[in-house]
Amino acid sequence: MAKIVNIRRDVDDKFYRYKMPSLLTKIEGKGNGIKTVIPNMSDVSRALSRPPTYTTKFFGSELGAQTSCDEKNDRYIVNGAHQADRLRELLDVFIDKFVLCASCKNPETDLVLTKNEDIIRDCKACGQHTGIDMRHKLASYILRNPPKKAKKTKGTHATASNGGATGGNGSPDEEGGSDDEFTKKLRAEAAVLPTADQVKVDENDWSLDTSAGAVRARQKTLEASVAGLTLGEEESEGEDPDSPYSILGKWVEENRDGSAVGFYKKAEELGVERKSKAVQIIAQKLFTDDVVKELEKFAPLFKKMVTSEKHQKALMGGIERFVGADQPELIPLIPKILMVLYQADILEEDFIKQWGTHVSKKYVDRDTSKKVRKASDPFLKWLEEAESDDE
């Protein structure tokens, strides 16, 4: 049984109220299959009020190692041989970055996702909202796998009383930079709202005409608008040339030399920046023969827009159409494309494995889907070898 230690190991007070089990490790396998199992990861994570997958993924990120999280069987693994002392040191870093309140250093915090896709620590002890470092690789994982009890809050709520997400006195940057570089650029280039003096109001149009004729006219206009739309995001491409997705696709083709921020702002202007369909359209229309280098350039854009498994599917759906249907000669580049997306933490390992082994005819015909996935075999094999074990 693991001994009980203070959550903050820098606190020597034996009466310190916040305790957790000491992290245990067990090394299994040999050769390329050697791995470190953490048998009490669930107990440690429960004491920290964080999912055990967060801590495991953090270890993998810091050590540059593959990880395996089997929640059903309560088994958490970091590839390679890692001593318990080293993982305990990394656990201290995790606690400091993702558990302790940056203001009072109390571990009574919950992770909360804001409307602006920032992550804050909501402290129950002092009431402060302090941001985490959104540049860390784990932040992207948390956004895609939010805590089960996490609540979406509006950006204004995150900066409520007591200094909000910035701590007591400052900007988000003072708390370790809660915004990634892409988000900072977006905010820097945000348009300034007009002042009251700049807004002109037509004095003859101060009220809504409620006459029967006006109501019928508005109803016809609404019906005409609705007629061009379909429910959800599964509308066929080209179905409505005036739909935001058709407009976005055409704009992307005409502005391939633009910036990642420019593409995001256009999607935002059309009101589809959070839609998986928008990710698919951009992935299908943006690239040329030099797709690998272009992916590296626009990785921040996709990292900002891809926030769920549905978005990951849409991203690969757009790429399937691009290389499978539009430029089949680029199909051999699929392993390099996957590597860029994987290293940029846009696609998750589990998703890539699922995608690579399940043919789908959602975006292209079945034969083309098979060819694209067959081309991914070298990358899938590389993933398997990276986490191979004695089995």
Image: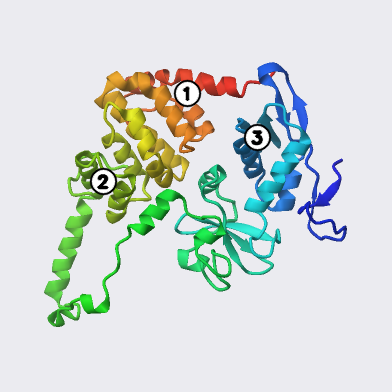
Asked if 198 appears above or below 381 in the picture, the reply is: below
Residue 248 appears in view = yes
Mark 2–mark 3 CB contact (< 8 Å):
no
The residue identified by callout 2 is 245
* Kind of residue indicated by mark 2: Tyr
Tell me if 391 is positioned left or right of 219 in this view.
right
Mark 2 or mark 1: whose residue is earlier in sequence: 2
* Kind of residue indicated by mark 3: Asp
The residue identified by callout 1 is 357
Element type at marker 3? Answer: strand
The residue identified by callout 3 is 70
Element type at marker 1? Answer: helix
The alpha-carbon separation of the residues under discs 2 and 1 comes to 29 Å
Residue 198 x %, y %: 21, 75
Residue 152 appears in view = no
Residue 78 x %, y %: 67, 32
